[in-house]
Image: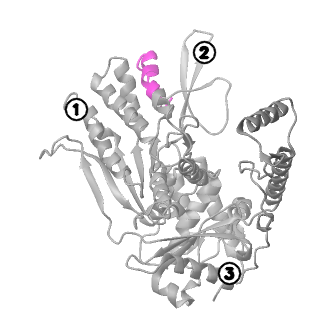
Amino acid sequence: MPILEAPTPPGPSSIRRSPRKSSTSPVKTPSNRFNGFATSNSMQSIASSSTMAHEMNGHHSDEEEYELERIQTDQEEEDAMSEASEEDEPYPDVHVEVRLHPDSRVQDSNIEYKVKDHIIEYVAVLNLGEYLNGWEIDPDLLAHVQQIWVEEAAVRSINPKQANFQIYVYRPQRHEFIEDFNNELEDYDDEDTVTAGSMRTLPSIELDGLWQTLIYADNLKSRLLNFCYSTTFFSECLVDSNIIAWNRVILLHGPPGTGKTSLCRALAQKIAVRMRESYPRAKLIEINSHSLFSKWFSESGKLVQKLFDTITKEVEDDGQFVVVMIDEVESLTAARAAAMTGNEPSDSMRVVNALLTQLDRLRVRKNVLVMTTSNLIDAIDEAFLSRVDLSELVPLPPPEAVYSILKGCIEEMMRKKMIKERKLLEYQRASVLTGFWEGQTNKISRYSGGLAALAKKCHELQISGRTLRKLPVLAHTTKLSGNRKRTLNDWIKAMLDIVQQQFQPPVKTSLVIANETSNGNGVVKNYHSNGHSHSRTKSVDRSQVGSMVAMEGGKDIRDE
């Protein structure tokens, strides 16, 4: 069904104006004649000189005054048009990603039209951050489409008739093709050869959907995606990078298990989908930073050169976008710092200097992005940090993000019929029920409150996102093994038990040193923490217990 849209009202630019004479075009005037004879060339030259002298004295001809008035009028009209366009609030962009069957040969434009037509005609309220349902009623979409994802935004839902749709159609690779390259300059048949990196073609079926599973606060994913848009925009505008500088380098740092590596891969997949119109092809090259050091002295720098020769060859294809990912980049910069102190061979410094040089050469390419990750940002050398455009902390997930991760795990088990399907509240409503969730008679409130209590407990214990996704398996292994189908209440309680048993820190031992004023000897007594404080209590690490025992002459203080 064709899309019915209101015709666009004509703007000021569509109003036809009568052509005006350009200031550069000659002005036709009648021939100068005197007594029927044409004026001589010398007389015309004298007249021209007189006119120029007249204008230099601050006088303008009528033609110049007309031209200045025309320029001023045009400028006022352009300013008015610009102000009017700024006052009109455009509809927000809604990004829709349509994944086709790998063997589909339908034109992308046809699918874009069909998807937009279906949403406007059949969807009254479009939920963002969810997979679109109901499109299967269209036989053309059913024959070619696998799934339709509506990207999340600042709002949860929107009226489709008040949205500016950005639709991206893509086909993932049917078979994953990952090419590995080793860390040797020659093709040696050596068991000790380590893979220096890998290269995969995008979009990848393995990475598809990874972006949706990564949940962070403060719009981290949006900032990363906007950075890619901005650098591409500046490059396509041919901005001089010597005046406005950018290096196309991103650094993600934070504690282990927060999803930094997964976020790099998901961003590469997202770029391949979103920028497909400008770059029909895309590749992800992952570099193993530990393998950049050769066992042969002085060969590490050459190895880096060989690796980046491969990258440069891929980047030379202007129709291909290349994402280079260097995981655990602090291992390189830490080796460089050690080399500067003389504790490491100079070959370590060579490999890092070679890496920095190659990054400088990549900055002139408009179709490349370098993403790096680190668990220890303090160990990263300043020379590398100065090349980073965007440095983002990837912290442990806050309670709301923990709840979303756990909720996603529960909903996946519901889709696979492992748990009876139940509706769960959003975190804002569920968080107020954490203190009394077990006494709720309403099952939705009970389950949502219990899941929120679990999320808060995980946040208190600083459990990483990687571990959070293991909780259902650990709960089933320890508490719910068997063929009997369990309720959602059983799963929540089992995961709470696992968190308290396996991730609760052990009770600390407090050693109280009582100074006996009568004999001047210190008597060491043992107390177990019970939540009470003591003015003379001193917390001591367990590794210090042995030395304190020795100070007491071999006296066992553990059971005092």
Quadrant housing residue 42: top right
Q: Residue at x 61, y 56 (%)?
A: 401
- Asked if residue 471 can be seen in this view, the reply is no
Quick one: SS at disc 1? loop
User: Residue 553: within the magenta?
Assistant: yes
Q: Relative to the observer, which residue lies in front, 35 or 398? A: 35
Residue 515: mark in rendering: 2
Query: In the figure, 429 relative to 72: above or below?
Result: below
How far is mark 1 from mark 2, CA to CA?
A: 63 Å
Q: Residue at x 62, y 51 (%)?
A: 398
Q: Is residue 175 left or right of residue 112?
A: left
Marks 3/2 in contact by CB < 8 Å: the verdict is no
Q: Look at discs 3 and 2 and give the one toward the viewer.
A: 3
Residue 120: mark in rendering: 3
In the rendered structure, which disc, 1 or 2, sits on the residue that comes first in sequence?
Answer: 1
Q: Look at discs 1 and 2 and give the one toward the viewer.
A: 1
Q: Relative to the observer, which residue lies in front, 238 or 455? A: 238
Q: Which quadrant does the N terminus fall into? A: bottom right
The stretch in magenta equals: 543-560
- Asked if residue 351 can be seen in this view, the reply is yes
Mark 3 crowdedness (10 Å alpha carbons): few <14, some 14-19, many ≥20: some
Q: Which residue is mark 1?
A: 299
Q: Amino acid at mark 1?
A: Glu
From the top left corner, tell me how far across and down residue 17 is, in percent. 80, 64
Mark 1 crowdedness (10 Å alpha carbons): few <14, some 14-19, many ≥20: some
Q: Is residue 198 left or right of residue 213?
A: left
Q: Residue at x 57, y 9 (%)?
A: 520
Q: Amino acid at mark 2?
A: Asn
Q: Relative to the observer, which residue lies in front, 388 or 535? A: 388
How far is mark 3 from mark 1, CA to CA?
A: 61 Å
